[in-house]
Amino acid sequence: MTDTTPVLPTRLPPAPVSPTVSVPEPSPDTDLAALLTAFRLLQVQHARVMHHESAVRGLHATDSRCLFFLAAADGQGVTPKQVGEYLELSTGATTSLVDRLEQHGHIDRRPNPGDRRSVLLHLTPTGSAVAQEIGAVWAGAFRDAVAPGDRARLTGVLERLGAALDRRSGTPGRDDDVETDVAAGV
């Protein structure tokens, strides 16, 4: 019978030593990198929540964004063209969106008193309720994460960030959209 016991060397090499890692002092660049990472993660979570909250209600995220846009109009109504421009949709996609929301009972079309050739879109009570329910998710998150004494400062930071992004986007006239999103709670 053959001995199958493994033969170990009498002398083992030394165990590797972990290198000394020094953590640099935070610099404006590392602080900026951390801020950008946090912002990207916030964008991902925002998209996930928007998708989930919309899907629970049988909607697409774009449908919900349209409801927020209409809610920010404070009952004044908006034209389908304004919706399409705000959401950056083609006329065909805008028509499908409006038809879908109307079929769900979340919006209705009313004659535009200023232009007989067009209509104004208005939220129905169910559309308003959906916008409020989804907006409440963000309101709750802000309430949980931002102390009341920090809210005005954070509002200013977000407004300045929105304006800075607008200036760098090359897209003219987007300031109103940023304000509309903020007013809608998104």
Image (cartoon, rainbow, N blue to C red):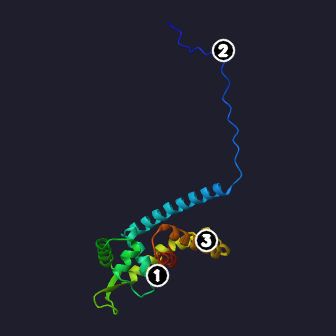
Q: Residue furthest bottom?
A: 113
Q: Establish if 34 lies above or below 60.
A: above
Residue 28 placement (x, y as % from top left): 66, 58
On the image, which quarter does residue 99 sit in? bottom left
Residue under pointer 3 = 157
Q: Secondary structure at mark 1?
A: helix
Q: Earlier in the sequence, mark 2 or mark 1?
A: 2
Q: Residue at x 70, y 49 (%)?
A: 24
For marks 3 and 2, give the CA distance.
65 Å
Residue 76 placement (x, y as % from top left): 42, 88
For mark 3, does the 10 Å Cα neighbourhood hold few (<14), some (14 to 19), or many (20 or more) residues?
Answer: few
Q: Secondary structure at mark 2?
A: loop
For mark 1, does the 10 Å Cα neighbourhood hold few (<14), some (14 to 19), or many (20 or more) residues?
Answer: some
Residue 57 placement (x, y as % from top left): 39, 70
Q: Is residue 123 visible?
A: no
Q: Is residue 71 visible?
A: yes
Q: Residue furthest top?
A: 1
Q: Residue at x 30, y 86 (%)?
A: 118
Numbered tag placed on residue 72 in the rendering: 1
Q: Secondary structure at mark 3?
A: helix
Q: Earlier in the sequence, mark 3 or mark 1?
A: 1
Between residues 81 and 67, which one lies in front from this camera angle? 81
Q: Tell me the amino acid under the disc marked 3.
A: Val
Q: Tell me the amino acid under the disc marked 1.
A: Ala
Foreground label between 3 and 2: 3
On the image, which quarter does residue 36 sit in? bottom right
Residue under pointer 2 = 10
For marks 2 and 1, give the CA distance.
78 Å
